[in-house]
Image: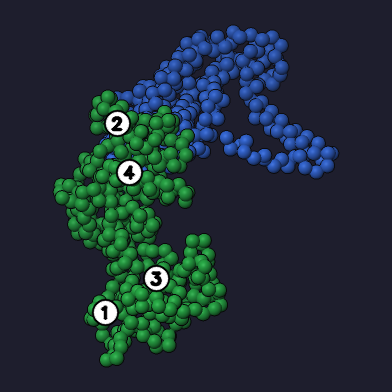
Chain colours: A blue, B green
Amino acid sequence: MAETTHQAFDPLATGSHARQLRAKFTVYALLVFFALLYLSPLVIIFMNSFRPLEEIVREGFISAPNALSAQYWVEAWSSFCIGGNCEGVSRYFSNTLIMTIPATILSTAFGVVNGYALSKWRFKYDTWVFGLITLGVFLPAQMTLLPWAFVLGKIGLSNTIGGLVLVHTVQGISFTTLFCRNYFVAVPDDLIKAARIDGAGFWRIFRRIMLPLSPPILIVCVIWQFTGIWNEFLFGTVFTSGSNQPITSAIVAFSGSGTGERHYNVEAASVIFAALPPLCVYVLGGKYFVRGLTSGAVK
Amino acid sequence: MSSLLIKNLRKSYGSVEVLKDINLEAKSGEFVALVGPSGCGKSTLLSIIAGLESVTSGEVLIEDKLVNNEAPKDRDIAMVFQSYALYPTMTVRQNMTFGMECRNIDKATQDDTITRVAALLQIEPLLNRKPGQLSGGQRQRVAMGRALVRDPKLFLFDEPLSNLDAKLRVEMRSEIKKLHQNVGRTTVYVTHDQIEAMTLATRIAVMHQGVLQQYAAPKEIYENPANVFVAGFMGSPNMNFFSARFVSSDAESGIALEGGDGALLPLPDGQYDHLTDGQPVIFGVRPEHFNPAHEGRAARKGNTSAVVSVAIEMDEPTGSETILMCKIAQQEAIVVCEPDEAPEPGTTMAFEIDMSKISLFDPSTEERL
């Protein structure tokens, strides 16, 4: 790896001993401060998900827990009432899952094929096609709301998970195409020429030559699409309602509804459920994400 | 029978014409080198032969079959690329079988072919490695192996040696020549290196700015270049070009260098009778056709040499020969001579020019006279 080939210059290891200590202390103090600052919401929510409601009400939201209980997690998952539906977040969680997984796979698959075709084959108006596809990257989602509502209504997919899969697949293709096309551009054209002379066609070249080179960018696409679609809120809120909503839209109910007492602990657990999958993906896949975006296709 | 025939070929990208009316023919088993400076269109021509680029007008025939609209895979060709273009995720063996797999050749035949070609190129120990684990020379061999597993009508080479270091390049050059002698297939070889072209080819096509300048055997190209470009491009160091005039009177005739003392350099009999008195010419002499003047050598050579006075300005000893930067009749010149005969810089010395090997060109058309 490149990191080990040279010793990085360490500015903290220069000057007098006192200066080095002072410099190190300052840097680490700042790092710790900002780390705590950014982590505090997660920590507070996490702690509240274990605290009894009376304790939260009595001692306030920010306080160390006295008695811990996992029952609020169980309640949040299976029996908590959200928007009049008392199945907990499990229903919305699975809604999101059956929306996110197909949409991620489909948009990535289309993106890889698009990227391959647009980077390695010349056809009439190919730059226009690429330009129009990537225009979607810059198009605000709000602008697409009305056209999508019209289309979903026409094809009978209003208020369905299937409808959201369609919307996210199409919206996602812009990103995946852009990622894959830019990645494949770095693959030497001579490889394609050699394969064409060898007698391979469009799909065989894709399957045998491009796809084996693709894992880094596939990982980028999957992580990007999975987290993006999971966290997406606008389409879910506008196009679905009731028990068909994805989890991000469903937990909006926590913010409104003035009636009844607030179950801060159960709500905290629900929110963590909603945030858990993208969080795991970031933690587990972050390294590959950066590697895929920065590495070339052929070394 | 001609293995490859190119008739009135033109290629344009938009309004830019990169190939202008190319006519080329390769007989079966011939080794044709396409040579020229970068941007001369030689690689485009090769791509067109391979079917990777379309034709704007004209015809390409492989073994008398028109292939203008045939896909590369249907032309029965094999190609070696400058970048080798080995499939990076496949092993050497898979690289070589990929083409056969695409053509649905059965497994047993594939194995036999691999064994044969791997033995021929001595790459058996590499068969299970990936291209990334090979050195430049090994990749080059594998790339040739991938071409050889197919028994094509035409081998195409696109500057295959330019990514190798100098020593390896010379080794691989002679291997390619040996290979061509063994396999005996018609080969088209693109290079910008005139030495590669001279050593390998049975015929050389010199290209410049999309125009085929001359297509002939290496010896013919070297001895009788068709124009100033070919003369200057082929041969190292470059041919010297002097501006001069043809002078003819009853008493004597010959070439008078501009800026010289007016002495006439006699031309060989019979060859230049079409020149007229006072006609300006470009007088071309290769650096190796100068020899230090010795008593009696002129007579020994059948009086075909003429003596000029050479003012040496700088020398470049290469070991086997010494290159002299000098002035002849106030004009820049390069002369090559044996190291032990080399004069000191700053001196003036008499050299003989072998007049049977000179070239004369028309200054306006730059064509051979």
Asked whether residue B177 appears in the rendered view, the answer is yes
**Mark closer to the chain start, 2 or 1:** 2
User: Which numbered dot is residue B289?
Assistant: 3
Pinpoint the chain carrying mark 1.
B
**Mark closer to the chain start, 4 or 3:** 4
Question: Whole-Å distance between the Cαs marked 3 and 1?
Answer: 19 Å
Question: Whole-Å distance between the Cαs marked 1 and 4?
Answer: 44 Å
The local secondary structure at tag 3 comes to helix
Pointer 1: what residue? B269
Question: Whole-Å distance between the Cαs marked 2 and 4?
Answer: 16 Å
Looking at the rendered structure, the kind of residue marked 4 is Leu
The front one of A50 and B18 is B18
Pinpoint the chain carrying mark 4.
B
The local secondary structure at tag 4 comes to helix
> Could you say where residue A85 lies in the image, as x and y percent from the top left?
46, 13
User: Which numbered dot is residue B113?
Assistant: 2
User: Closer to us: mark 1 or mark 4?
Assistant: 1
Tell whether B97 sits left or right of A278: left
Instruction: Say whether mark 4 and mark 2 are on the same chain.
Output: yes
User: Closer to us: mark 2 or mark 4?
Assistant: 4
User: Closer to us: mark 4 or mark 3?
Assistant: 3
The local secondary structure at tag 2 comes to helix
Pointer 4: what residue? B179
**Mark closer to the chain start, 1 or 4:** 4
